[in-house]
Image (cartoon, coloured by chain):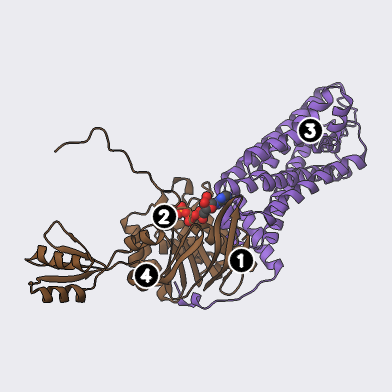
Chain colours: A brown, B purple
Amino acid sequence: MIEVRGLTKQYGTVRAVDDLTFDVRPGKVTGFLGPNGAGKSTTMRMVLGLDRPTAGRALVAGRPFAGLARPLRTAGALLDAQAVNPGRSGRDHLRVAARTNGIPVRRVDEVIDQVGLGPAARRRVRGYSLGMRQRLGIAGALLGDPAVLLFDEPMNGLDLDGVRWIRRLVRELADEGRTVLLSSHLMSEMEQTADHLVIIGRGRLIADASLEEIMRGENAARRVRVRTPSGDDLAGALLRRHLRVHPTGDGDLLVEGASAETVGDVALELGVAVHRLAEEHSSLEQVYLDLTGDSVQYRVLAAPEPAGQVRR
Amino acid sequence: MSATGVAVRSADASTATVFARAASAEWLRLRTVRTTWWCLLAAAVTIVGIGATAAFDEAQGPAGPGSTLPATLAGEFGVLPGQFALLVLALLAVTQEHATGMIGPTLQWTPRRGVLLAARVAVPVAVATVAGVLLALVTDVAAWFIAPGLTLSLADLADSLGRIAAVLAAGSLLAVGLGLLLRSTAGALATVFLLQLVLPFLLPAFDVAWMRDLGRVLPGSGAIWTLLGEPDMTAVLATTVLAGWSAAALAGGGWSLLRRDAG
Ligand SMILES: Nc1ncnc2c1ncn2[C@@H]1O[C@H](COP(=O)(O)OP(=O)(O)OP(=O)(O)O)[C@@H](O)[C@H]1O
Ligand SMILES: [Mg+2]
């Protein structure tokens, strides 16, 4: 369990985290989402006592992390896979970690096997790929067999195999009853992995709800796909009811903000045949974009058309 | 992975235990990077090499047989330049953590910053001091063999090695403190070199009163006096200068580690 209460961090004139309050519960994968610069990493750093909050506090397993004598037994984290001394071997890096927390060296070799670092563990980190560094970082997080885990964008730089491995690992950790907080920008990954979502923007809380709730929430605009031989008639009738309708390329109609019942009833009233009627829920990506649209700080300007476009 | 991890274990350890673990980890950290060994090699070559050469010169010189120069001069001559390899060792132990971002994981492993500070200061300072004293001892004995005109008594040895230990402890405290405060290898290294080597030699050369006075209160001047008895300075002043700079650097570095964000 991680409890964040009124957490605030001011860097000079930047309010990186602004009065954030939420809980991360055991037995679930909690996805931590937000645009670049939203304050996700800063929040995790404060939870782990790396940065001092301007106001508020965070508790890990009921206690401030910075007071723990064997912190790795309580919480493990991977914040920045690059933050390793490149001159030390991966195994020595973990041996140092183990020693600080009174963990037997045997456990070091266990986690090396668990993350699949294998023989590379005895080489210096200097020669590791990003994916190998991520694995080393995760090994460090698992070292103390902790009840709480924090991962900041652990899938960055991983190949497909690595991504799938993290997805399974995170699932297993949560199923074992651990608390897992996972940040990522990969919405499709989150949709598959997370049970609960905490979404922030510009340091403030935007949403704190289960994936289910967020996907069905008011921002999760529902729409209905309908296939009918009398497209024009049905579209006309729906438009008269102030529903937005657009045709799709393949001859179906998409009706925004309506339920399948409404569309079916309209069709019945009109007496037109319906060959297909399906509610479509937006992807997490769409819901997320709607939720965070106002709090994106670093927006990409529309790119100019490339000059030498290939004509078909 | 065992499922026992799910239960939160509150095996709380005493501060002494946490310190022992942190210090042992600092020692492992030092041993597992090559920089440490390069610094020790450089220190060995400089201290023993320069010390033995000085002793050889002494044996050839006019004050040859019949003089009563102590062999411990060799170790002192060697440590004067050789200390810098040891100060670099102690300094890198601290600044590399910030340069690589490793301070993040380090603070996750030992979040009690006071304990981390104690271990992080004690271990590199002890390593640099012990290594320097051992190398000086080797140099003294070697010099005594090379130049039989030199004398070697236990009293001389104890006195000389004691002064060398004081100089190295003060110097590496300064280096570690500045490393913790400045967090940058280049910045801290430049500052240590200026305070310990460049300015103490440069300032008196200007023959301006206030520059000479300023030069005398720099840590390097205290170190040179403690090693060689030059330039003119009282033992009280030298001790005050050495202890004062170490204490100030430690206070600044300690504040930085205890109070600032990990960075
Ligand atoms: N040490 C620092 N000094 C000054 N400003 C900082 C510092 N660390 C973070 N910030 C600022 O705080 C804000 C939040 O940054 P943070 O790294 O927490 O965002 P994030 O949600 O992790 O973003 P990303 O998705 O890009 O990783 C940003 O505006 C950032 O510029
Ligand atoms: Mg981040």
Q: Position of residue B46 (x, y in %)?
A: 69, 34
Q: CA distance from mark 1 to mark 3?
A: 56 Å
* Residue in the picture at 75% in, 32% down: B197
CB under 8 Å between discs 2 and 3? no
Taking the view exactly as shown, the residue that stands out farthest to the front is: A240
- Judged left or right of residue A187, residue A244 is left
Mark 3 crowd level (few <14, some 14–19, many ≥20, 10 Å Cα): many
Mark nearest the camera among 1 and 3 is 1
Chain under callout 4 = A
Closer-to-camera residue (B149/A306): A306
Do badges 2 and 4 share one subunit?
Answer: yes
Residue marked by disc 3: B77
Closer-to-camera residue (A44/A174): A44
Mark nearest the camera among 4 and 3 is 4
Q: Position of residue B137 (x, y in %)?
A: 77, 42
Residue type at numbered disc 1: Gly
Mark nearest the camera among 1 and 2 is 1
Question: Which quadrant would the N terminus of chain B be assigned to in this image?
Answer: bottom left
Q: Position of residue A285 (x, y in %)?
A: 33, 60
For residue A214, the mark is: 4
Residue marked by disc 1: A56
Indicate the secondary structure of the residue bearing disc 1.
Answer: strand
Chain under callout 2 = A
